[in-house]
């Protein structure tokens, strides 16, 4: 782990960055996280891959590792897979943010009758970013129960990191179509497409070009692990470069099967330039969240 720390430090120093801002990291109640890790350990059906968790530590050590990498701000991405779970997760996340000031207060939701109420409560409590996982949650983002949620978040300008791409395995409501219909109704929604929309990279780049408030996070994209089964099309690199002010660093820490530094070097070897890297790894998120 010491080599990883030094590698990340060299990356930051070469770019002259004060630190990194990672918009896609996972902190959640321990019993929920253990279930997530058990799923990866079993090569669950969505992945079907060996997935050794690189940073399988207790919460305090995970925080220490992330901070040792020079990560100035991060998130506590968490998500429900059934009704009645989101409000409880939001209560936990509010407490986590209160005791972890460098974490951007994160919240989530699920299509259920009280979603509008508890999302408003989370916003009033200071939530800075939301997570929506259409694959794990297996819900349609156009469910009428979510109408007040998308409207509220669009109006408030609060970003929503959304796993809406069909990787690593397609879901009933994944792909650019369902979330595209949400954007058509709420064009000002600050949607952050997780994983660059893998594997529908080109289609999600088109959505970002069509909607100025749409952004993409880099989570797992371009790594050796992902390039084996879902390579980013080289022909689209120019479009990714042109959207450089709307691409944000995400990593999926701690639930990654490789080192944190590898995600950074995977971006570096794209050859899109140091200005692009500085924007992606720090400046874009700094501007978006005002930190």
Image: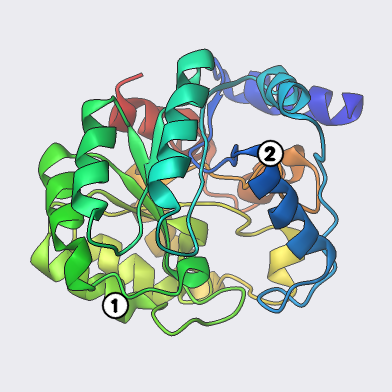
Above or below 32: residue 94: above
Residue 201, visible in the rendered structure: yes
- Viewer-closest of 96 and 174: 96
Going 12% across and 60% down the picture, which residue do you hit? Answer: 186
Residue 212 appears in view: no
Q: Give SS at disc 1.
A: helix
Residue closer to the observer: 51 or 198:
51
- Where is residue 157? Give x, y as percent: 18, 39
Q: Which of the two marks, 2 or 1, is nearer to us in this view?
A: 2
Question: Which badge, 2 or 1, is on the more N-terminal residue?
Answer: 2
Residue at image point 20% right, 66% down: 145
Q: Are marks 2 and 1 in contact (CB under 8 Å)?
A: no
Mark 2 is surrounded, within 10 Å at the Cα level, by few (under 14), some (14 to 19) or many (20 or more) other residues, namely: few
Q: In the drawing, does residue 232 fall left or right of residue 261?
A: left
State the image coordinates of residue 117 (x, y, percent, origin top left): 19, 45
* SS category of the residue bearing label 2: helix
Q: Residue at x 42, y 33 (%)?
A: 91
Residue 228 in the image, given as x and y percentages of width and height: 75, 73
Rendering quarter of residue 239: bottom left
285 to the left or right of 39: left
Q: Quadrant of the N terminus?
A: top right
Of residues 157 and 230, the one nearer the viewer is 157
- On-image quarter of the C terminus: top left
In the picture, the disc for residue 30 is 2
Side (left or right) of 253 relative to 148: right
Q: Position of residue 93 (x, y in %)?
A: 47, 32
Q: Kindly identify which residue carries mark 1.
A: 178
Residue sitting farthest toward the right: 2
Residue 172 higher or lower than 279, as above or below: below
Relative to 81, is 275 above or below? Answer: above
Label 1 Cα crowd, 10 Å radius (few <14 / some 14-19 / many 20+): some
């Amino acid at each position: 782990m010491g080599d990883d720390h030094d590698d990340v430090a060299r990356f930051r120093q070469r770019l002259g960055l004060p630190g990194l801002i990672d918009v896609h990291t996972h902190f959640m109640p321990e019993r929920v996280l253990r279930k997530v890790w058990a799923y990866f350990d079993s090569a669950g059906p969505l992945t079907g891959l060996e997935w050794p968790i690189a940073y399988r530590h207790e919460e305090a050590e995970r925080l220490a590792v992330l901070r040792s990498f020079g990560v100035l701000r991060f998130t506590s991405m968490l998500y429900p897979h059934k009704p009645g779970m989101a409000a409880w997760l939001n209560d936990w996340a509010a407490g986590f943010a209160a005791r972890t000031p460098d974490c951007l207060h994160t919240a989530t939701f699920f299509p259920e009758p009280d979603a509008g109420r508890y999302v408003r409560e989370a916003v009033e409590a200071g939530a800075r970013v939301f997570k929506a996982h259409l694959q794990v949650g297996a819900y349609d983002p156009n469910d009428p129960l979510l109408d007040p949620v998308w409207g509220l978040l669009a109006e408030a300008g609060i970003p929503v990191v959304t796993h809406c791409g069909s990787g690593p395995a397609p879901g009933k409501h994944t792909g650019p179509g369902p979330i595209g219909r949400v954007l058509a109704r709420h064009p000002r929604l600050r949607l952050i497409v997780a994983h660059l929309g893998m594997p529908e990279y080109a289609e999600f780049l088109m959505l970002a070009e069509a909607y100025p408030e749409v952004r993409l996070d880099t989570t797992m994209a371009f790594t050796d692990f992902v390039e084996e089964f879902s390579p980013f099309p080289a022909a689209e690199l120019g479009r990714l470069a042109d959207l450089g002010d709307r691409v944000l660093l995400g990593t999926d820490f701690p639930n990654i099967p490789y080192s944190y530094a590898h995600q950074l070097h995977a971006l570096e070897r794209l050859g899109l330039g140091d200005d692009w890297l500085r924007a992606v790894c720090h400046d874009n998120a700094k501007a978006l969240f005002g930190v």
